[in-house]
Image (spheres, rainbow, N blue to C red):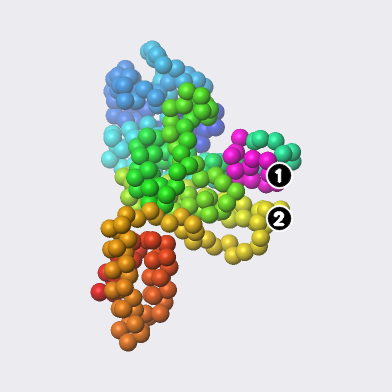
């Protein structure tokens, strides 16, 4: 299979299962089509394989199977020695798909109840892409439950953020099975906390090299989307005109235990003494950063500054 054909299938808009097994078995080194079918019939690939490209079915029979883009890339990693060109093609597709999905705005004329929680009864332009952990898991191809657990332990508990919800595969809360955290709110502080979450996922969550490249693209489009939303909010008088840059703390101060509070107090004092101009030429600027971290109960940041000074 030529790279041009692979790109054509990646960018196919007809189905989410664009790759036919009849074109893939020789490409992946199988001598017979049936041998490749046996691999596709494994339970672990069940959700990524279908008979017909326009519908997903539970039972598969002999014939041509169709697989998702993600499973195709997994097979490339498994069966091919050199797949750099395919990686670049997949990234190009991801970039275009995320751009069209995220940088999309709608104008609501009537005070109805649109699907977006952020809109509620407000009129005007609003982004249509939901800022939640469920969409992160879909766009990065990671487990929904594992990402939710990670966010609960590594992020939301530190920032005392509790906007957790549940949904099913149809986006309804009846018989909901998928838990997620939502960051859609009329307050810009909550929206920009979503970007801080993406940074935490990039730094601490177990991601492949490809997923790390995707999350960089993803974060860039989310930042651009929120900047455009600020412009709309100022223009439509939902927000006063202020500086567009945001810090990622605002009123979200991590909840510290008594032991952590005592530790923060001790380390802050020691670090503040090392910021004296007689001991450090750049002490004034460092002290500003140190003081800001102390006000926001950022123990990790205070420790980092202290380790650099000592």
Instruction: Locate residue 1 relative to residue 77 in the image: left or right.
Output: right
Kind of element beneath mark 1: loop
Q: Which residue is located at x 67 percent, y 53 percent?
A: 238
Q: Is residue 37 above or below residue 150?
A: above
Question: Percent x, y for residue 298?
Answer: 37, 61
In-front residue for pair 255/10: 255
Asked if the residues shown at circle 2 and circle 1 are in contact, with their CB atoms under 8 angstroms apart, the answer is no
Residue in the picture at 28% in, 58% down = 259
Front residue of 138 and 258: 258
Residue bounds of the magenta highlight: 115-127
Q: Specify which label sits upstream in the sequence, 2 or 1.
A: 1
Provide the secondary structure element on which disc 2 rests. loop
Tell me, for residue 123, which label it has, or none.
1
Residue at the right extreme of this rendering: 109
Residue 46 falls inside the magenta stretch = no
Residue sitting at the far left: 310
Report whether residue 221 is seen.
no
Rendering coords of residue 149 (x, y %): 35, 39
Q: Main secondary structure of the magenta part?
A: loop
Which quadrant does the N terminus fall into?
top left
Question: Residue 111's quadrant in the figure?
Answer: top right
Q: Residues within 10 Å of mark 1 (few under 14, many from 20)?
A: some
Q: Which mark is residue 237?
A: 2
Residue at 43 percent of width and 21 percent of height:
50
């Amino acid at each position: 299979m030529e790279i041009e054909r692979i790109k054509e299938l990646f960018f196919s808009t007809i189905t989410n299962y664009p790759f036919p097994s009849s074109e893939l078995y020789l490409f992946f080194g199988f001598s017979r089509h049936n041998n490749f079918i046996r691999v596709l019939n494994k339970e672990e690939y069940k959700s990524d394989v279908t008979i017909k490209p326009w519908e997903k079915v539970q039972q598969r029979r002999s014939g041509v199977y169709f697989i998702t883009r993600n499973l195709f890339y997994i097979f490339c990693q498994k069966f091919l020695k050199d797949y750099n060109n395919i990686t670049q093609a997949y990234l190009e597709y991801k970039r275009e798909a995320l751009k069209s999905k995220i940088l999309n705005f709608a104008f609501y004329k009537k005070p109805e109840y649109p699907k977006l929680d952020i809109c509620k009864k407000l009129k005007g332009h609003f982004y249509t892409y939901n800022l939640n952990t469920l969409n992160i898991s879909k766009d990065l191809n990671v487990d929904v439950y594992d990402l939710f657990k990670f966010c609960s332990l590594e992020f939301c508990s530190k920032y005392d953020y509790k906007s957790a919800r549940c949904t099913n595969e149809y986006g309804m809360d009846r018989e909901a099975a998928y838990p997620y955290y939502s960051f859609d709110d009329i307050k810009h502080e909550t929206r920009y906390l979503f970007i801080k979450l993406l940074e935490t996922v990039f730094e601490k969550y177990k991601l492949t090299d490809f997923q790390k490249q995707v999350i960089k693209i993803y974060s860039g489009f989310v930042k651009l989307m929120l900047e455009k939303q600020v412009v709309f909010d100022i223009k439509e008088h939902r927000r006063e005109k202020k500086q567009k840059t945001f810090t990622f703390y605002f009123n979200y101060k991590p909840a510290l235990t008594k032991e952590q509070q005592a530790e923060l107090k001790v380390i802050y004092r020691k670090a503040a003494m090392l910021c004296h101009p007689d001991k450090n030429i750049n002490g004034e600027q460092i002290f500003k950063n140190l003081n800001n971290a102390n006000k926001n109960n950022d123990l990790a940041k205070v420790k980092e500054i202290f380790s650099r000074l000592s």
